Image (spheres, rainbow, N blue to C red):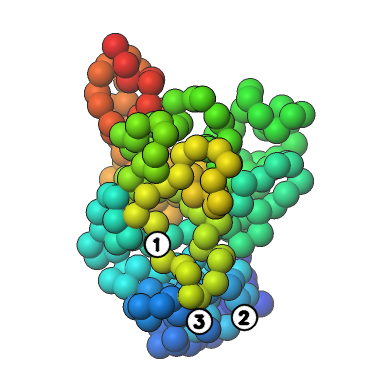
Amino acid sequence: TTGCHGNQAIADEFGAIAGGHHGSGGSTLTADTTKHFTSGSTTDMSDAYRMLAGIIGIEDNDWEFTKSDGTGDHNQYYGIDRAAETDTAAGSVSSLCASCHGTFHNGAGNVSTSFSSPWVRHPTDFDMATATGTEYAFYNGGDGTNAAPYSVVAPVASTIANAGASTVAPLANVNVTSGTADASAIVTCLSCHRAHGSANADLLRWDYAGITAHSGAGNIGCFICHTTKDDI
C-alpha cells in the first residue's frame, strides 16, 4: 500500500501486482504493436505502465535491454510542464516519487512565487524549452535550434506519451525550442536518479564527484542539460 509498484489498494504484495507480467501491456498499443502504452490505470496492472499504478508511459519493446541516444530505443515517461506549485503533475513519474518525497516535487517554499528561479530544490515536471535562450536549448549536443538527440543518460519526459495509441512512440529527438507542438524536454526525478539504485551515491545516474564546473569535461552527466557549465 506504500510501495511503488502495483495496486496500492491491495496490501498483499503479490495480489497487488497480479496480472502485471502477463497482461497486454496496456489497453492500447502503438501502430507497430511492439511498444506498450498505458493511460495510467490504478487498479488493473495489465494496463499499468511498468506496473506503476496511475503512471503513464511507453514501454520499450525490449525493456531497455538495448538503448541508445537519438533513437526511439528506450522507455518514455509522461511529463507535465507544471505552471503552478499546486499542480501535482498526476500521471507523471515525478508524481509517484512525490508520494514519499513530497517536498522535492511541489513543497511550499521550494520555488519562488513566480514558479521560476531561484529554485531551492531541483525542478521536476518543468519543460526546458520554456527557458528560451538558455543553455538548455543545447541539450545533449544540440545546436540550440533544431530538435536534439534524446539522451538515455539524462532522459526527459514528454507530453506525447499521453497522446493516443496511433501516434505514440518513444522519442528519437527532443524539442528544445519553445512554441513546439509537444513538450518533450520535461525534467523528471528520473532524469538524474535511477529508481532501483545505481553504483553512484544518491542513486544518481552518474558520479557526481566527477562533475566539475568549468572543467571542459564535455557532454556528460549534469552537463547534458547544463550545457555551458563545463565550459573552460
Please state if 166 lies on the left or on the right of 99 as rendered: left
Mark 2 crowdedness (10 Å alpha carbons): few <14, some 14-19, many ≥20: some
Question: Earlier along the polypeptide chain: callout 1 or callout 3?
Answer: 3
Gap in angstroms between the C-alphas marked 1 and 2: 25 Å
Question: Earlier along the polypeptide chain: callout 3 or callout 2?
Answer: 3
**What's the residue at 35%, 32% (across, down)?**
143
**Tag 3 residue:** 28
Horizontal and vertical percent position of residue 137: 44, 32
**Tag 2 residue:** 43
Q: Disc 1 or disc 2, which is closer to the eye?
A: 1
State the mark number for residue 170. 1
**What's the residue at 50%, 37% (across, down)?**
177
Gap in angstroms between the C-alphas marked 1 and 3: 15 Å
Badge 2 marks a residue whose secondary structure is loop
Q: Is residue 22 above or below residue 113?
A: below
Horizontal and vertical percent position of residue 55: 56, 66
